[in-house]
Amino acid sequence: MSTPRRGVLVTGASRGIGAAVARRLAAHGDRVAVHHRASRERAEEVLASLDGDGHVVVGGDIGDPAAVPSMVATAADALGRIDVLVNNAALYTEPAPGGHRRLGHPLDATPYEEWVAAWRRTVDVNLLGTANVTWCVARHMLDVDPEPGAPRGRIVNVGSRGAFRGEPDVPAYGAAKAGVHALGQSLALALGEHGIAVSSVAPGFVATDMAAEHLEGPGGDALRAQSPFGRVAAPEEVAAAVAYLASAEAEWASGAVLDLNGASHLR
Ligand SMILES: NC(=O)c1ccc[n+]([C@@H]2O[C@H](COP(=O)([O-])OP(=O)(O)OC[C@H]3O[C@@H](n4cnc5c(N)ncnc54)[C@H](OP(=O)(O)O)[C@@H]3O)[C@@H](O)[C@H]2O)c1
């Protein structure tokens, strides 16, 4: 059984998978800090859609190490205690000035300066940002006791199939996600003795803003055909797995990297 009224921080919950996770956990009775970077209005809309009460919106660019401690402190103050961290926020490609997303940084078509910048920003947000949010929340979990009988903490990372299958157009994304999986496994070993379980999910394509350009483009059918089910995931399917990994009974899944890709990539 999960602890009633847990405090949960979901990074990148203003849309997509993070919003679905926030809704799922709120429906379960948790109090959720809905984190966003720039989309405060969308985060407020997610907040308004959540079941129950005691939820809060927190903002901040996780790629900025100086912004992370105050974001986590704001969430912890509002929730009282953070029992669950869902490290979901990430970028695939940074939106270009003017709105549309760049195609990525395929090695054979990317000037060196752009290559360096893409790797820097992707690793800053997806890997270092995740590590820094995790440090702040795990430190809080260690310092503030949970309710009697409740686990000290659960940390669930949203990784990616791309870490295993390769990301030829966005290699920094694939590499950073591989790092996220490895971070989760190292911390599963480091934090287990404290009663904190750490795991990751590795989704294939999911129908969100992040994947929209690919799924709605001319190659969309081929992407759907990667799975024998002939489709991509809904955000709610990823949220269901995250909810399990965040539960008290999932302690023995600590260290796992759970494939969620509709058999589109078997390893
Ligand atoms: N969609 C897929 O096909 C897919 C597949 C595998 C894995 N994933 C992973 O699933 C997770 C969620 O993806 P999604 O598809 O739901 O993405 P999305 O729709 O693009 O949403 C991304 C979320 O992350 C936040 N975010 C982005 N950059 C940030 C930064 N620098 N600092 C703080 N927050 C930031 C965004 O906040 P704002 O709204 O304020 O910008 C937004 O809430 C990511 O880790 C992604 O890598 C997605």
Image: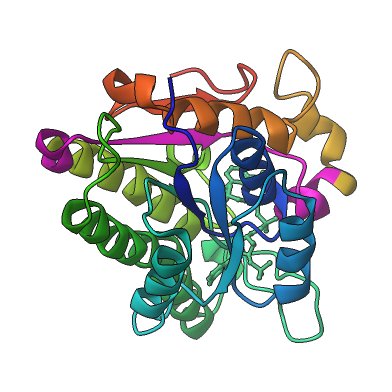
- Residue 42 percent location from the top left of the image: 77, 66
Q: Quadrant of the C terminus?
A: top left
Q: Quadrant of residue 36?
A: bottom right
Q: Quadrant of residue 3?
A: top left
The vertical placement of 230 against 46, above or below, is above
| Left or right, 210 with reference to 163 | right
Viewer-closest of 198 and 169? 198
| Left or right, 150 with reference to 39 | left
The vertical placement of 64 against 94, above or below, is below
What residue lies at 52% left-to-right and 33% top-to-bottom? 242
Considering every residue shown, the one lying at the far front of the view is 148
Asked whether 199 falls inside the magenta stretch, the response is yes
Q: Classify the position of ligand 1 by quadrant: top left, top right, bottom left or bottom right.
A: bottom right
What residue lies at 78% left-to-right and 73% top-to-bottom? 41
- Residue 104 percent location from the top left of the image: 63, 64
The vertical placement of 167 against 256, above or below, is below
Considering every residue shown, the one lying at the far top of the view is 228
Extent of the magenta region: 190-215
What residue lies at 59% left-to-right and 60% top-to-bottom? 12
Q: Quadrant of the N terminus?
A: top left
Asked whether 72 falls inside the magenta stretch, the response is no
- Residue 121 percent location from the top left of the image: 47, 75
- Residue 147 percent location from the top left of the image: 30, 40
| Left or right, 229 with reference to 127 | right
Viewer-closest of 55 and 95? 55
Viewer-closest of 95 and 191? 191
What residue lies at 77% left-to-right and 55% top-to-bottom? 209
